[in-house]
Image (cartoon, rainbow, N blue to C red):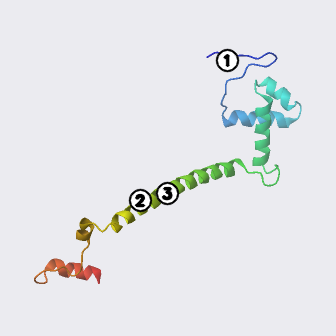
Amino acid sequence: MDKKIRKGRKARRQRRHFDPAFKAEAVRLCKVGDRTIAQVAVDLDLTETALRAWVKRAEVDAGEGPPGALTTDERAELARLRRENKRLQMEREILKEAAAFFAKENSRGSSSSARRRRTFPPPCCAPCSTCLVAASTLG
């Protein structure tokens, strides 16, 4: 699959991943002040947009961002909580469907469900050790 290049547009870069140490160093170079973000981006072969996002994220993490902005740790916790919430909602739906299924099965009044119900004490001819053990655990 060849990517077509339109007239006047740059070819799209393949997505690259950078470790946190590299990002921190790039942000530090921007903060030093002798070069602009655009110049640092060219020197490090980065897109200016990506470098600006890293600088902004570093400012928020340092507490210098706009009020209400989430730090990296807060964003990670929010993502974790959203995943957990989604999982719990799915579990709840499954349990609701299972409860409805079993309620429907019990309402049929089948003879097999009547056989499963046990009465206490069981109808036996004389009290036995099994009945006495069961009575002591119930009462």
Please name the residue that numbered disc 2 is placed on.
Answer: 98
Tag shown at residue 93: 3
Is the N terminus in the top left, top right, bottom left or bottom right quadrant?
A: top right
Q: Which of 112 and 14 is in front in this view?
A: 112
Q: Which residue is drawn at 68% across and 37% down?
A: 20
In the rendered structure, the answer to whether residue 19 lies left or right of residue 84 reads right
Sort mark 1 into few (<14), some (14-19) or many (20+) by Cα contacts within 10 Å: few
- Earlier-in-chain disc, 1 versus 2: 1
SS for tag 1?
loop
Percent of width and height locating residue 32: 85, 36
Percent of width and height locating residue 36: 87, 31
Do tag 1 and tag 3 residues touch (Cβ < 8 Å)?
Answer: no
- Earlier-in-chain disc, 3 versus 2: 3
- Earlier-in-chain disc, 1 versus 3: 1
Q: How far apart are marks 3 and 2 (CA)?
A: 9 Å
Tag shown at residue 3: 1
In the rendered structure, which amino acid carries the disc numbered 1?
Answer: Lys
Percent of width and height locating residue 102: 37, 63
SS for tag 3?
helix
SS for tag 2?
helix
In the rendered structure, the answer to whether residue 82 lies left or right of residue 7 reads left
Q: How far apart are marks 1 and 3 (CA)?
A: 44 Å
Q: Nearer the viewer, mark 1 or mark 3?
A: 3
Sort mark 3 into few (<14), some (14-19) or many (20+) by Cα contacts within 10 Å: few
In the rendered structure, which amino acid carries the disc numbered 2?
Answer: Ala
* Residue at the farthest right position: 34
In the rendered structure, which amino acid carries the disc numbered 3?
Answer: Glu
Q: Residue at x 76, y 43 (%)?
A: 57
* Residue at the farthest left position: 125
Q: Residue at x 80, y 23 (%)?
A: 43
Sort mark 2 into few (<14), some (14-19) or many (20+) by Cα contacts within 10 Å: few
